[in-house]
């Protein structure tokens, strides 16, 4: 069975599309009532084309057709929790290293270390930068999967929150490029480690930007804050669309 609007293949017993959320009965009734002057049916695709592609706005904002209220209120609880946790990250000074002491740092660290390995063939500078790239890239991969593979924009908004959190996770490390006082992997400190062990000391020294370490760290915080806000607003709007759809049934 294919959706008459977006052509998405799904279970024959569905009453609404798993991808775009259209209610089949209402869509067919509207198509039946909308006729040309010659009497032939005229089906309108307000956000899709006849080849079954789906618009960018549908990808970003179409809520999943979940009948179970537990899913809806569970997502709402997650959104409220992430909003509160975002405030904690935003209000913590960089020097406190709150991101480095949080649970999320343990989540991000394996992707950071894997990034060093993946980018090792590209030279010493890119190897050092690869850790940061790795931990930023993973949330973006998850975001893409949620949007384009599973069609779950709320899940994508959570992945965007994770991306913003990674910028906060990076900021104390960047800020430490000159002071070298943060503990590093293995219990070392930057001041007692050989040159190149501290990623951002090496990156900023080699690029001649060491004097901008504090500015770059603050920039990570500002961008991360904006991403936090965007992710919460996005997730909230998706839940609002889902709530309105349920209310209209």
Image: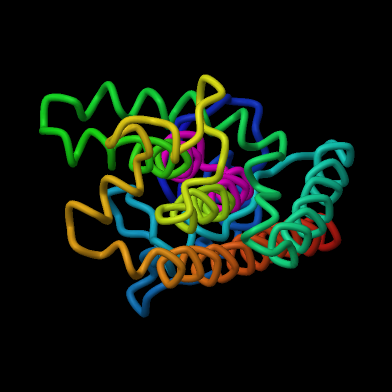
Residue placed most toward the observer, 44 or 152: 152
**Quadrant of res 237:** bottom right
* Magenta residues, start to end: 142-162
Q: Residue 119: give x, y in percent of width and height.
A: 21, 30
What residue occupies the far bottom of the structure in this picture? Answer: 37
Q: Residue at x 64, y 52 (%)?
A: 63
Q: Residue 249: give x, y in percent of width and height.
A: 82, 56
Q: Is residue 165 left or right of residue 128?
A: right
Residue placed most toward the observer, 78 or 238: 78
119 vs 44: above or below: above
Q: Is residue 139 magenta?
A: no
Q: Residue at x 78, y 58 (%)?
A: 88
Residue placed most toward the observer, 36 or 80: 80
190 vs 115: above or below: below
**Quadrant of res 12:** top right
Q: Is residue 152 magenta?
A: yes
Q: Residue at x 81, y 62 (%)?
A: 248
Q: Is residue 149 left or right of residue 107?
A: left
Residue placed most toward the observer, 178 or 90: 178
Q: Is residue 246 left or right of residue 132?
A: right
Q: Residue at x 30, y 62 (%)?
A: 210
């Amino acid at each position: 069975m294919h959706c008459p609007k977006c052509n998405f293949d799904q279970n024959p017993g569905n009453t609404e599309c798993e991808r775009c959320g259209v209610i089949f009965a209402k869509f067919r009734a509207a198509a039946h009532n909308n006729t040309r002057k010659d009497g032939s049916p005229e089906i309108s695709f307000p956000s899709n084309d006849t080849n079954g592609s789906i618009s960018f706005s549908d990808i970003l904002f179409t809520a999943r057709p979940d009948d179970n209220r537990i899913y809806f209120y569970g997502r709402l609880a997650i959104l409220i929790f992430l909003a509160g946790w975002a405030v904690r990250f935003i209000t913590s000074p960089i020097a406190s290293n709150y991101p480095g002491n949080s649970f999320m740092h343990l989540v991000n660290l394996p992707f950071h270390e894997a990034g060093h390995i993946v980018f090792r063939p590209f030279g010493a500078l890119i190897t050092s930068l690869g850790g940061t790239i790795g931990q930023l890239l993973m949330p973006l991969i998850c975001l893409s999967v949620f949007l384009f593979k599973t069609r779950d924009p709320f899940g994508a908004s959570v992945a965007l929150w994770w991306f913003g959190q990674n910028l906060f996770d990076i900021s104390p490390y960047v800020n430490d490029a000159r002071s070298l006082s943060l503990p590093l992997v293995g219990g070392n400190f930057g001041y007692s480690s050989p040159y190149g062990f501290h990623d951002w000391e090496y990156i900023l020294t080699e690029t001649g930007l060491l004097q901008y370490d504090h500015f770059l760290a603050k920039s990570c915080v500002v961008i991360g804050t904006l991403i936090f806000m965007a992710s919460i607003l996005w997730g909230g709007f998706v839940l609002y669309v889902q709530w309105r759809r349920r209310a209209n049934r």
